[in-house]
């Protein structure tokens, strides 16, 4: 099966050319934000009966291979994992390799995010065990995809989009294999305790509730009950005990270091000053920032300004690090609503402080729900590889078309009251502000402010923000101005020629197709 | 080795840097040939965006340098055009293939000429071999940048750094920063002058000055080059005193030329000369620093302090800078952008001080208008030196952008 040849293409509402069929499934091209009306009912797993499960509650089996056989693993199935163990994860590859030993072919691997450490999945694709990867293709996996080597088409979804796709039945998980830093033999699982602790397990929620079969893999089995049960044992078929689910040093960093790059520090400071000057930073406000170098430095800068002005936040959204934990401990926020935890301080805080709350993509990001937390956030600070003159942004590919990153929560966060992209105006001669993005990951109408070391550009649609910062000393400039200055410094780059063969699609939060990732080499 | 070999220039040479960890630089391997075309091979991180531009630029630069037959291998790490041109020229010169020619990058318009008594609270050092630091230096708003050809440049890299600094002065926008160059100790420093003065630096820092004659030598050479190119912009001189002898001769050095704009001290070398350790409190250099301040003031120029080398210790820097300001220094060197703000805070007058000075200035203006010789504030008479200090302080605060 090779679905990437002879694809029908259509132009969507964002003006991007996208395939109408992906991996044999018909697609809806992006219709504009808030334009697509979902219909029908949510997907659901089959009804089960307690009679098929031991009364003792002990669902342990000898090993992962046995568990997969018991789950009825066969060719073409969709196997999913959460990514809470990040670059330290061993469980996803353990499961895929067990499947390879069983001898199945053409699996769809469906992790909530993939990492460079999982590059041996390429070998499994070469051997035919994995047909293609959906949701997130990072680093070498992304490269493999844009080199046109993957048999199926990559499907890139946001964290919220993944929940939506599972919930809406766009993708059905046959077997979910979920790593658990702590679990009991009933299958209750918790992420914030144990030697492989990672914080929350929210990215596994959809998998555990919608998959046909669920396997929990742990290296810290406790007698029933394992509390808190972030994954409910009532959804779990089998429990497998292993020596180690991951490398703790790569699951969370010991201590998160703040960048020393003067350019990044300057950008971070400008973002914080913008929130202050615009009045967004006020008592009871909320914000979210990632764990990249600029985002962490931003939290530090904002903290100084909050202290200086005597301002307290109602909640902040993680990915948490020690910098958010310090805000909580110093009384500068009432809550951390956390989706994932990046360092030891974050894990400890979640385990011990009831104000540090584990959340899931259902609560935070799912667009096909009755609201989500992302739109309640006053300001979010995100990164991007490129942003164009219409404020459209790219977070998945480089300017040469190589796919290098998943979307993560990035798209979902665009629904915040004020979306700020913080990025260098150029990196090593490569401009970050371009005529037109290589891959549209976020439509410009949802991106409000672009902060670079050379100045701050406000989306002309946000006249309210222009007015809010009048009289401040901030370097507010038209985005065209910054682009022109960068081109004076770097020269005007030529646009790399991409092949006209689609390798992956970028889904919007509602499941429609926002853009195409084309073969790059 | 016979003499014929010694006098034949090398046919092959390299310049620049590439590899893991190198950013914004380029490595050029150049081989002169007797016949054939110019052959260029290019490997670049930015090949998809700038590959053809780099090839085109390389051809243009070689053409300007008069190279007709050569093989050139370029490994580029995202270098900007002014860096690429400098590295090519350095490699070609090292191979002995340049016949008195240069290849200058597109010029950026020169800023306003620098005033002799301008505000010089902070001067950010930029190593002469590290092009990645140049392009954004002015964003941190130091009062000056110092393109350094001396201590931060390896002995074997002096020739290449000189060309890079020349191109930087010409092509890089340093905004409102004063553009300073620290040359090498004389006589090597004279070779630096020959290359960089033509691109109108605002000020030359002369290291290890011990005798006034050294300042005069630099001044003469600058004057000659300016005359040759009919350059009218001032190029100021800031001698660096870095030895016991230099400190002893401070006043004579400060008055050696009317182009001396400030006097500064280098504590690493000074403490080494004394044979004592350089400490955070700086007790060992109290005398020298006070002497430099006094000599500078006597000569009618400001004194600028050394650098604070513990980059991570911003609190320590703040204490040092405040003490330094209290001693009479008017600024200091910075080795990291994060130091600039701390240094500015220390060297600029505080709100209360400015308020007081403004009252005195207002009283002075009032007295002027009324034709009174005596300035009084409330029931108190204000002495003339106090009036002068207040006028100067308000003027400086304006120049620093603290008040408008």
Image (cartoon, grey):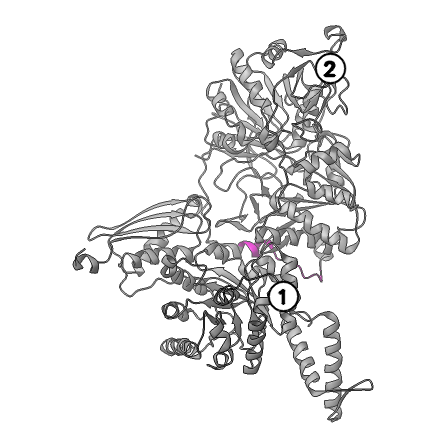
Whether residue B150 is in magenta: the answer is no
Residue A448 location, x and y as percent? 67, 48
- The residue that appears at 41% across and 79% down in the rendered structure is B213
Most extreme residue toward the front, as rendered?
B275
Q: Which residue is mark 1?
A: B321
* Helix, strand or loop under label 2: loop
- The residue that appears at 77% across and 23% down in the rendered structure is A227
Using the rendered view, name the quadrant where residue B396 is placed: bottom right
Q: Chain of mark 1?
A: B
The residue stretch that appears in magenta: A470-483
- The residue that appears at 67% across and 81% down in the rendered structure is B389
Q: Is residue B147 above or below residue A348?
A: below
Q: Is residue A294 above or below residue A362?
A: below
Q: Is residue A476 visible?
A: no
Q: Is residue A456 visible?
A: yes
* Helix, strand or loop under label 1: helix
Q: Is residue B353 left or right of residue B186?
A: right
Q: Which residue is mark 2?
A: A186
């Amino acid at each position: 099966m090779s679905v990437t040849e002879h694809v029908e293409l259509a132009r969507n509402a964002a003006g991007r050319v996208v395939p109408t069929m992906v991996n044999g499934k018909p697609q809806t091209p992006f219709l504009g934000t808030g334009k697509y009306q979902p219909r029908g009912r949510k997907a659901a797993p089959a009804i089960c009966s307690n009679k098929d499960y031991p009364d003792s509650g002990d669902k342990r089996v000898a090993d992962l291979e046995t568990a997969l056989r018991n789950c009825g693993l066969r060719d073409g199935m969709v196997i999913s994992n959460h990514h809470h163990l990040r670059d330290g994860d061993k469980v996803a590859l353990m499961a895929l390799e067990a499947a390879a030993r069983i001898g199945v072919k053409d699996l769809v691997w469906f992790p909530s995010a993939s990492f460079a450490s999982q590059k041996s999945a390429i070998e499994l694709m070469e051997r035919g065990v994995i047909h293609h990867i959906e949701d997130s293709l990072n680093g070498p996996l992304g490269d493999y995809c844009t080199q046109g080597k993957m048999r199926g088409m990559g499907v890139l979804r946001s964290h919220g989009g993944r929940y939506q796709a599972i919930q809406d039945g766009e993708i059905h998980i046959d077997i979910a294999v979920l790593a658990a830093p702590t679990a009991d033999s009933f299958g209750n699982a918790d992420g914030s305790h144990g030697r492989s602790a990672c914080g929350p397990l929210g990215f596994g929620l959809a998998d555990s509730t919608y998959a046909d079969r669920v396997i929990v893999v742990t290296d810290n089995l406790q007698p029933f009950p394992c509390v808190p049960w972030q994954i409910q044992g009532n959804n779990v078929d089998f429990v497998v005990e292993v020596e180690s689910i991951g490398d703790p040093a790569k699951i969370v960093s010991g201590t998160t270091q703040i960048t020393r790059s003067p350019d990044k520090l300057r950008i971070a400071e400008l973002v914080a000053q913008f929130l202050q000057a615009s009045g967004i930073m006020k008592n009871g406000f909320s914000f979210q920032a990632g764990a990249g170098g600029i985002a962490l430095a931003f939290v530090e800068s904002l903290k100084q300004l909050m202290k200086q002005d005597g301002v307290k936040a109602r909640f902040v959204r993680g990915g948490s690090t020690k910098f958010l934990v310090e805000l909580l401990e110093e009384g500068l926020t009432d809550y951390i609503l956390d989706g994932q935890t990046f360092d030891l301080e974050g894990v400890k805080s979640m385990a011990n402080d009831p104000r540090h709350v584990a959340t899931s993509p259902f609560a935070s990001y799912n667009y096909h729900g009755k609201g989500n937390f992302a739109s309640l956030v006053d300001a979010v600070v995100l990164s991007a590889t490129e942003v164009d003159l219409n404020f459209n942004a790219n977070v998945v590919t480089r300017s040469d078309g190589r796919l290098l990153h998943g979307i993560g929560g990035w798209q979902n966060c665009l629904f915040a009251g004020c979306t700020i992209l913080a990025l260098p105006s150029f990196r090593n001669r490569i401009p970050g502000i371009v005529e037109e993005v290589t891959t549209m990951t976020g439509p410009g109408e949802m991106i409000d402010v672009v902060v670079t070391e050379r100045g701050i550009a406000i989306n002309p649609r946000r006249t309210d923000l222009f007015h809010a910062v009048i009289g401040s000393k901030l370097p507010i400039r038209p985005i065209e101005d910054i682009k022109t200055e960068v081109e004076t410094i770097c020269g005007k780059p030529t646009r790399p020629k991409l092949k006209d063969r689609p390798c992956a699609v970028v889904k919007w939060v509602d499941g429609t197709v926002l853009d195409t990732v084309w073969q790059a080499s | 080795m016979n003499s014929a070999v010694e006098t034949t220039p090398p046919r092959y040479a390299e310049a620049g840097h590439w590899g893991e960890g190198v950013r914004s630089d380029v490595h050029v391997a150049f081989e002169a040939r007797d016949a054939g075309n110019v052959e260029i091979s290019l490997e670049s991180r930015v090949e998809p965006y700038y590959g053809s531009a780099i090839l085109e630029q390389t051809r243009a630069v070689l053409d300007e340098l008069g190279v007709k037959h050569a093989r050139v291998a370029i490994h580029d790490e995202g270098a900007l055009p002014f860096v690429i041109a400098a590295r090519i020229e350095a490699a070609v010169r090292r191979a002995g293939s340049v016949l008195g020619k240069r290849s200058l990058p597109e010029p950026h318009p020169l800023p306003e000429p620098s005033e002799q008594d301008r505000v010089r609270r902070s001067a950010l050092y930029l190593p002469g071999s590290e092009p990645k630091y140049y392009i954004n230096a002015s964003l941190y708003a130091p009062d000056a940048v110092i393109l350094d050809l001396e201590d931060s440049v390896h002995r074997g890299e002096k020739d290449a750094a000189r060309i890079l600094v020349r191109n930087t002065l010409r092509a890089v926008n340093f905004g409102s920063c004063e553009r300073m160059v620290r040359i090498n100790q004389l006589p090597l420093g004279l070779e630096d002058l020959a290359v960089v003065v033509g691109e109108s630096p605002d000020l030359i820092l002369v290291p290890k000055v011990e005798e006034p004659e050294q300042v005069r030598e630099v001044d003469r050479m600058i004057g000659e080059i300016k005359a040759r190119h009919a350059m009218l912009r001032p190029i100021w001189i800031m001698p660096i005193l870095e030895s016991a002898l230099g400190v002893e001769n401070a006043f004579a050095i400060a008055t050696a030329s009317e182009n001396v704009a400030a006097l500064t001290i280098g504590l690493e070398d000074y403490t080494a000369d004394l044979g004592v350790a350089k400490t955070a409190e700086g007790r060992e250099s109290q005398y020298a620093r006070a002497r430099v301040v006094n000599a500078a003031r006597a000569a009618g120029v400001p004194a600028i302090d050394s650098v604070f080398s513990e980059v991570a210790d911003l609190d320590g820097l703040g204490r040092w800078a405040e003490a330094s300001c209290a001693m009479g220094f008017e600024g200091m060197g910075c080795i990291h952008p994060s130091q600039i703000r701390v240094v500015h805070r220390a060297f600029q007058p505080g709100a209360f001080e400015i308020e007081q000075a403004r009252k005195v200035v207002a009283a002075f203006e009032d007295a002027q208008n009324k034709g009174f010789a005596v300035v009084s504030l409330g029931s108190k008479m204000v002495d003339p030196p106090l009036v002068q200090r207040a006028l100067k302080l308000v003027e400086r605060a304006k120049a620093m952008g603290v008040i408008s």
